Amino acid sequence: MTGFTYSPAMQKAKIKWDAKSLDAFLTKPTALVPANRMAFAGLPNATDRANLIAYLATATK
């Protein structure tokens, strides 16, 4: 996203964002990107994550 200041950890992550990596990140962000500054604990419910990922897939088309 242009103009957004990402944490150094996110900048260095080099993640190819796809459904699998996004699911891992949404499950527990600090497990995928340690030391990120995101104030988000994650979505533990697999159905909630799947619904969010499906929504994001339609929102980007």
Image (cartoon, rainbow, N blue to C red):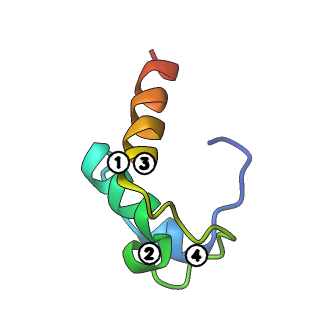
Q: Look at 48% across and 70% down and name the residue there.
A: 29
Q: CA distance from mark 2 to mark 1?
A: 13 Å
Mark pair 3, 4: CA separation: 25 Å
Kind of residue indicated by mark 1: Trp
Q: Which residue is mark 2?
A: 33
Left or right for 22, reference 40: left
**Label 4, label 2: how far apart the Cα atoms are:** 10 Å
Residue 49 circle label: 3
Tell me, yes or no, whether the two marked residues, 3 and 4, touch with CB atoms within 8 Å. Answer: no
**Position of 21 relative to 1 (above/below):** below
Where disc 4 sits, the SS reads: helix
Circle nearer the N terminus (2, 1): 1
Mark 3 or 4: in front is 3
Q: Residues within 10 Å of mark 1 (few under 14, many from 20)?
A: few
Left or right: where does residue 8 sit relative to residue 48? right
Residue 17's label in the rendered image is: 1
Residue assigned mark 4: 8
Mark 3 or 1, closer to the camera: 3
Q: Earlier in the sequence, mark 4 or mark 2?
A: 4
The quarter of the picture where residue 61 lies is top left
Provide residue 1's location: percent of width, then percent of height: 62, 42
Give the amino acid type for the residue marked by disc 4 in the picture: Pro
Query: What amino acid type is highlighted by mark number 2?
Result: Val
Sequence-wise, which precedes: disc 3 or disc 2?
2
